[in-house]
Amino acid sequence: MKVNFRLNYLVLFSVLTMSIFFGCVAAIAASNTIAGETDLSVQSETYWGTENESLWSENPSVMSSDSENYRPGLKGQHFLAQNQGAEVKSSAPSSNKSSGFSSASEAARKSSNPLGGDFFILLNQFDNYAMEGDITDKQRWINTWSFQPVVPIPMEKTLGDHWIWVNRPTFPFVFNADLPDADDLSPGLSPDGPPSGTRPSGDIPAGGVPFDSFSGFGDIVYFTLLGQSLPQQRWGGGDFVWAGGLTTKFPTASKDELGGGVYSAGPSVVLSFIGKKFILGTLYQHWLSYAEGGNGSGDNENFSWLNLFYFLNFEGGWQVGGTPIITADWEADKASDRWTVPIGLGVYKTQIFGKMPIKFGLETQWMPITPDTYGSNWDIRITFAPIIPSLFK
């Protein structure tokens, strides 16, 4: 199994560069916020909103996220991940108010709104997929990292109360991907996730096909949503969130094995309830290819992606739930290679460090339905998401 150390160093350099850049952004945003508000308690009320205000001035979990999975000449899920929140406590320590939140629980819950609000979320999601299928005689692995900054822009002055426009690109990196090295299989990963459907042109030999290890940069996904986060009194209080928009995919992969080789676009929709006691919602995206380009297989894409997220909120910024992503590759030759259906359960914690809330998460997903040819059986997901004040008000 070959490892491209030069690419790994390049990825590490990219991580450090982006960390420094967004650290500077956070420092500038924090200094601008403090300069504009002489009293921190007033800043917390006017900039971030109080616990009784609409979650509209609050950010999403980062949908899982998101959220992307990978596939070799196939299509898969997205790295989109969901960081969910916990109940707001009005009696939180005053030392946390300098962060713009009255407590870690408030920061966790408010950052669960998929439309965003008065802050950015810099989601880093690490997925480790255990792969099996007819083309291999043993378990393989795909290890990925996706960086997904959530950039919300309030539109209240333009469109009216509770309107917001959220933008989120996904930059996927592959640390290691065990993929088939065979001419009779369409190679290529896309940032939608782990392998979930192949298109063999011949019989699979006994014992499977030869495999190789690949690393590098994947296809960039960008989606934008316009919608509202409407305050509700039912179910203990919270916000009903709805939005619609466009999702696009670009063939930016550094290698053929790591990309789809096509330009794709389609609709994106989100519906969710962000409550004080629980969070429930879904984010849907669909891609249809319209042109070839870049690195990848160049196969037509007709791919559905449905991210479910469900969480119970607890005090202290804790949350328990899951963020499974159901995918369907409508171009798969066999129905048994079309669907990936996971079940996820994890623990998330939001902690305020100085003035910056940071979300941490650990989740395990099991796929009871997965492609027969080559697909993921398990996924261990680790999330790390700093939350910084938005530059837009």
Image (cartoon, helix red, strand yellow):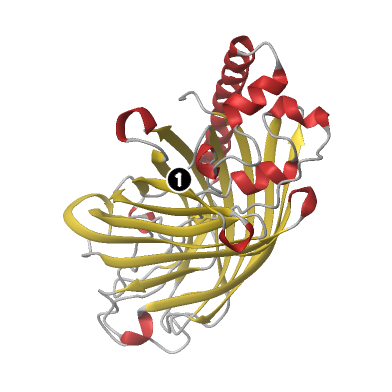
Q: Residue at x 57, y 58 (%)?
A: 127
Report helix, strand or loop for mark 1.
Answer: loop
Q: Is residue 355 visible?
A: no
Residue placed most toward the observer, 192 or 189 = 192
Give the x, y percent position of residue 68. 46, 57
The residue furthest left is 291
Q: Quadrant of the N terminus?
A: bottom right
Give the x, y percent position of residue 155. 36, 33
Q: Of the residues shown, which amino acid type is indicated by label 1?
A: Leu
Q: Is residue 309 above or below residue 293?
A: below
Give the x, y percent position of residue 301. 24, 64
Residue placed most toward the observer, 124 or 345 = 345
Choose top left, top right, bottom left or bottom right for residue 97.
top right
Q: Is residue 354 visible?
A: yes
Residue placed most toward the observer, 166 or 16 = 166
Residue under numbered circle 1? 115
Q: Residue at x 75, y 57 (%)?
A: 314
Within-10-Å neighbours for mark 1: few <14, some 14–19, many 20+: many
272 sits left or right of 198 in the view: right
Q: Is residue 345 above or below residue 268?
A: below
The residue furthest front is 233
185 sits left or right of 68 in the view: left
Residue placed most toward the observer, 267 or 293 = 267
Q: Is residue 330 above or below residue 125?
A: below
Give the x, y percent position of residue 277. 67, 59
Q: Residue at x 54, y 24 (%)?
A: 21
